[in-house]
Amino acid sequence: MDSLLKHMVDMTGHRDHTMLDISVIAAVQELGGAVQTRVLNIATIRGQLFVRARAVIRRGSQARMEAHPDQPGAGAPVAASVALKTCLAQRTAQAEWIDADGQRTLWLPIWIGDKADTCLEIIHDAPYNSDTMHIIGGIVSVYRNFQNLLDYSERDSLTGLLNRKTFDDQLAKMLQNAATEALTLPAPQERRRPAEAEKQWLAVIDVDHFKLVNDKFGHLYGDEVLILIANLLHSSFRAHDRVFRFGGEEFVVLLRSTTLEHARRIIDRFRINVSKHHFPQVGTVTVSIGFVSICASDAPVVILGHADQALYYAKSHGRNQTCHYDELISGGLLAPVASNDTAEFF
């Protein structure tokens, strides 16, 4: 009981989704003695439901955020799990499936109103008794309430993406972590070449000719375009990347730990996915993107300013393209601009 209370205190003390996810799966894992517990993200892409893990804990290991390989797609289709598909369609509290070896998978969707964007998945060897299920249900209820509070303060009401305030907090944390890692890294000759090339990245995205969409088709269709682009952001980027709506037709992505070429491929995959997508009534929509590596010694306004310069180069040289700030500078295509750390770029 003391351990359970500690987990509940940990859950209610967090103010971001990442730590909340880790806390809830750690609590459920310890309580239920599960083989594995995961937090799944539920997304609708082109009318189909997909699930992709955000956090995972396995028996005998520590809880962690789930890293996904650099590959397209939104995850596993819900249709592959009949019990989960039925549960989501009927909006029930739980679903369970037992495999041929008797191992059980329990799904607990986190319903907020009539919508579930998150689901807990618990894989265990034996059925839980009513007392254990009652306690797990209580943990899920606390998790749901705190997730609802965080969503209200952190997310954009139209697209469901993280908002500008949350971006400021996330970028500050990323810079702080990068500075800490820089202090603890081994000497240059001791580093391995692949790790040396890995960096954090920031991409600024702008929908091309969005004003024309609103003027020609109306704001309702304009809003639908933004919602569909938000869905494409979710399906094109990795689970541990962070996507934000800055307002209007501007979006920002923070990409975690990857190389320049991987970052370019991930970012350009999204751009291509948008250009190939059919937007109802509107037809074809494109985006322009500027991106930059994140340096711990730079102020946030400098990083944003550099990505913004690359974005506007893309928009003024044909649109529907991805431009990297450092390559534009080194190629003489863009002149560096002295930045005032108090300036606002957005």
Image (cartoon, grey):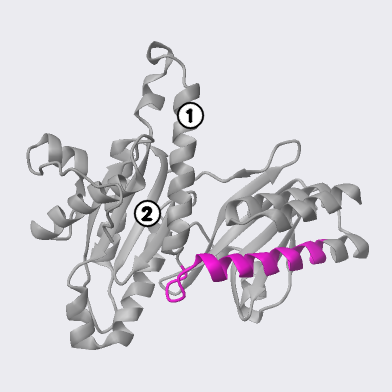
Q: Which span of residues is magenta-colored?
A: 136-160
Q: From the viewer's perspective, tell me whether residue 216 is left or right of residue 56.
A: left
Which residue is labeled 2 in the image?
Answer: 253
Q: Residues within 10 Å of mark 2 (few under 14, many from 20)?
A: many
Secondary structure mostly seen in the magenta stretch: helix
Q: Quadrant of the C terminus?
A: bottom left
Percent from the top left, x then y, of residue 293? 31, 40
Evaluate whether residue 71 shows in this view. Answer: no
Image location (x, y in percent) of residue 35: 76, 45
| Residue 280 lies in quadrant | bottom left
* Residue beneath the point at 41% across and 62% down: 164
Res 181 label:
1
Nearest the eye: 137 or 103: 137
Closer to the camera in the image, 275 or 255: 255
- Classify 224 as above or below 166: below
Could you tell whether 104 is left or right of 250 in the image? right
Say which residue appears at 28% left-offset and 45% top-offset: 302
Please, what is the three-letter code of the amino acid marked with disc 2? Val
Q: Amino acid at mark 1?
A: Glu
Counting the numbered discs, the total is 2
